[in-house]
Image: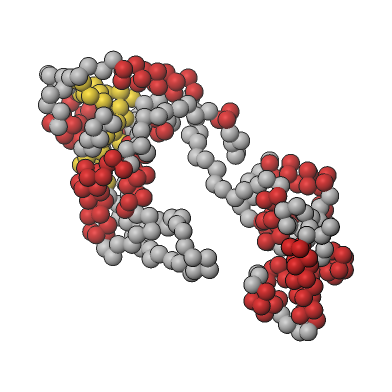
Amino acid sequence: MRRSSEEHGVARRANSILLLDDGMSCVQIAKVLYLDDDTIRDWHKRYVFGGLDELTLFDRLGGISRLKADQETGLSLWLENRLCRSTNEIRAYIEKYYNTRYSHSGCIKLLKRLGFIYKKPKALPAVANEAAQQTFIDFYETLGRTLPEDEAIYFADAVHPEYQTRPSYGWMKKGANTAVKTTSGRKRVNIHGAICLENFDVPFIEVDKVNGQSAIALLEKIEIRNKDKKTIHVIWDNAAYHKSREIKKWLSRPNCRIHLIQLPTYAPHLNPIERLWGVMHKHVTHNKFYETQIAFANAILSFFRNTIPNEWESFRDTVTDNFRVISHQNFRVLE
């Protein structure tokens, strides 16, 4: 028995064909039926190709099934070996190899029915040393469990937010033509900062250029804020300025309380401060426009000076040391 929803769908398609015969355009009919004009064009092509019977074919999900089972299997295998950024390439493939035409909206319905979704691939380090990652995680967990009260652990890194609005997802009324103003500036705010996950202390400095001198200035600030600590473990990446001669000379001074620990190469996911940078962008740059670069810089600095001290508990569960080993074996890596 045909479902009432399918009967309604067939009626709409038949009406669109009649309206086309009356001289209305696809755009005009789409407005009347609250559809997109590509759908009307596709219905017309199907009617020309197979008559009224072609307009009565539905699958269980409400999309029109035009490919045979073996063709759908072949299409799925083809899609699984590449990442198509638009339906144009997929539609061209279907037409070339299966002699079947799909509209943009019809192709999307087909892809959803076959189990495909539109999303970005995850960004993975080009070189993922699993053993080095696990070694660091084991070392860090042991350090945390056995850390004396007169020692502390900080994660450090630099960030360079550009004077740019970052459009971001958000709920809006369907059909609303929502936009956010952007700038053409390329100026940056250079921040060298650190974070202690125990108390969410976030010392930072704003500098004209991130280098060995800014790294030393940050380490000095960390020492000043931890006068009661005998040893302060600072974990950061392998950037050249983190291993410079001036850093080594500064560390060799008498009574230096900083103990540096290098992260494994290509392992930014093992530095929680990277997650803090994400929180910063969410608060400061996502869907927010600043008239001047100075206003933008002040907003960045306000995040560090005011938002973190006053609201850190609201995003503490986001900035964590819940580490895991990243392996290429767990992903289909695009070449």
* In the foreground, 115 or 244: 115
Looking at the picture, how far across and down is residue 263, in whole percent?
Answer: 36, 26
Please identify the quarter of the rendering in which residue 142 is found: top left
Question: Is 17 situated above or below 150?
Answer: below
* In the foreground, 83 or 33: 33
Q: Residue at x 75, y 66 (%)?
A: 9
Please identify the quarter of the rendering in which residue 258 is found: top left
Residue 243 in view, yes or no: no
Q: Residue at x 34, y 59 (%)?
A: 288
Quadrant location, the C terminus: top right
* Coloration of the structure image: secondary structure
Looking at the picture, how far across and down is residue 292, in whole percent?
Answer: 26, 63
* In the foreground, 50 or 163: 50
Does residue 20 appear to the left or right of 211 in the view shown? right
Q: Residue at x 63, y 46 (%)?
A: 83
Looking at the picture, how far across and down is residue 146, in whole percent?
Answer: 28, 15
Question: Is 252 situated above or below 315?
Answer: above
Looking at the picture, how far across and down is residue 277, in whole percent?
Answer: 34, 43
Residue 153 in view, yes or no: yes
Please identify the quarter of the rendering in which residue 270 is found: top left
Question: Is 106 situated above or below 119?
Answer: below
* In the foreground, 69 or 10: 10
